[in-house]
Amino acid sequence: MTRYLLDTNIISNVIKPKPSEALLTWMAAQQDDDLFIASLTIAEIRRGILEKPRGKKRDTLDAWFNGPEGPRALFAGRILAFDDKAGLIWADLMAKGKIAGRPKSGLDMIIAAVAAANECVVVTDNEKDFVGLQIINPMRERFETAKK
């Protein structure tokens, strides 16, 4: 059974007024217990909301974030922390990128490290920042089967 760590951009796409149909199809084919998010995703989403000017859109996003359909409620028990194991993996990923002359995004590598520490595949549409790592992009790839 494969476990998946959803990148922040996947959560952001799902809540768009017109989310990716391919993504929705892929997500519907997965078992909820196999889908995880990182604590960083909670922080990134919250930061994005707080950076919006006060008004209706921010209020709507805030209500979603704190409500029963928000990420903390939907992923209760499936929010993975950036712990010491993930921290060591992150250091390795960052150092290897720098040594190879291809520095990596610190935040993206936190997602990658949390995934690796918890034996998850990263689900993202940000392929360029995860080059060389195990990912899937359900918005680009066609998935004939829900499980491998």
Image: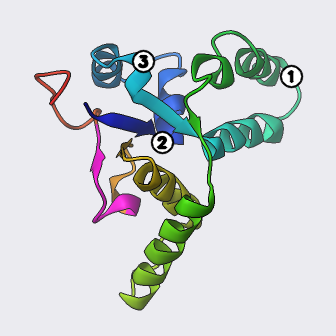
Residue type beneath disc 3:
Asp
> For residue 72, which quarter of the picture?
top right
**Which is nearer the N-term, disc 1 or disc 3?**
3
User: Residue flagged by tag 1: what amino acid is it?
Assistant: Gly
- Which residue in the structure is indicated by mark 3? 32
The N terminus: image quadrant: top left
Q: Residue furthest right?
A: 54
**Secondary structure under the numbered disc 2 in the rendered image:** loop
Check residue 55 in the rendering and tell me which mark sits there, or answer none: 1
The residue sitting at 48% across, 59% down in the picture is 113
Position in image of residue 80 (x %, y %):
57, 41
Quick one: 64 or 34, which is closer to the camera?
Answer: 34
For residue 38, side relative to residue 14 (left or right) = right
Q: Nearer the viewer, mark 1 or mark 3?
A: 3
Q: Quadrant of residue 87?
A: bottom right
Residue 9, how many percent across, how many down? 50, 39
Above-or-below relation of 55 to 8: above
Residue placed under numbered mark 2 in the picture = 7
Crowd tier of the residue under label 3, counting other residues whose Cα lies within 10 Å: few below 14, some 14–19, many 20 or above: some
Residue span colored magenta: 129-137
